[in-house]
Amino acid sequence: MGTLKDLLTTDLRAAMKARDELTTSTLRLALAAVGNAEVAGVAKRELTDDEVLGVLTKEAKKRREAATAYADAGRTEQAAKETAEGEILARYLPTQLDDTELAELVARTLAAGGFTTVNQMGPAMKAVQAAVAGRAEGGRVAAVVRSQLAA
């Protein structure tokens, strides 16, 4: 099939042909963010699928935060647009873990690594983030790890 970036490009072309303006603009912004990440640093390089996934995750998070900010300010049209863009980006992200699955995964990872105290938060987070692999937001993961280590 190709890389995730190729999939985004193919879907962008399809959205343009279908005259789907929301999808077109969202995918253009996502591809621009990927392009910016590729040229960041010393030399231009191709991003791996995992790195592209990281960029898409950040973009989706921006959309969620913007939608919340617009909703809080009473700007429902803009909030709905940001939410719709976030849903388009979510198509390319792995399925998110629910709270129960996340708690079980964290418990298994902490037990396997022998992490028992809050003082081990850093190494525990590193191990858990590797196990989660982008299927949950960092803030959610940190809260669950902290609560399980404190217990």
Image: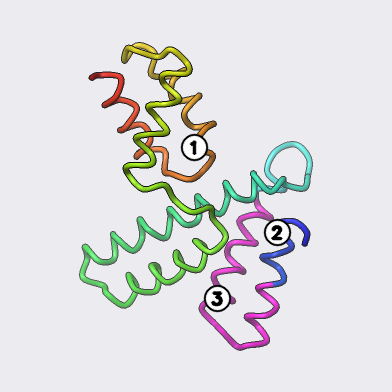
Q: Please state which of residues 104 and 125 is positioned toward the viewer in this rendering.
A: 104
Q: In this view, does 70 lie above or below 102?
A: below
Instruction: Calculate the distance from the C-alpha at mark 2 to the C-alpha at mark 1.
Output: 22 Å
The residue drawn where x is 54% and y is 31% is 130
- Pick the quarter of the image with the C terminus: top left
In x, y percent, where is residue 110? 41, 21
The residue drawn where x is 38% and y is 39% is 102
Instruction: Calculate the distance from the C-alpha at mark 2 to the C-alpha at mark 3.
Output: 15 Å
Q: Name the residue under label 1.
A: 132
- Element carrying mark 2: helix
- Element carrying mark 3: helix
Q: Is residue 63 above or below residue 42?
A: below
Where residue 21 sits, quadrant-wise, is: bottom right
**N-terminal of the two: label 1 or label 3?**
3
- Give the extent of the magenta segment: 11-36
Q: Does residue 109 appear to the left or right of 80 in the view shown?
A: right
Q: Are marks 1 and 3 in contact (CB under 8 Å)?
A: no
Q: Which amino acid does label 1 sit on?
A: Val
**N-terminal of the two: label 2 or label 1?**
2
Q: Mark 3 points at which residue?
A: 23
Where residue 5 is drawn, which disc sits there?
2
In x, y percent, where is residue 48? 72, 45
Q: In this view, does 96 lie above or below 143?
A: below
In x, y percent, where is residue 26? 54, 70
Q: What residue type is labelled 3?
A: Thr
Instruction: Calculate the distance from the C-alpha at mark 1 to the C-alpha at mark 3.
Output: 28 Å
Q: What residue type is labelled 2?
A: Lys
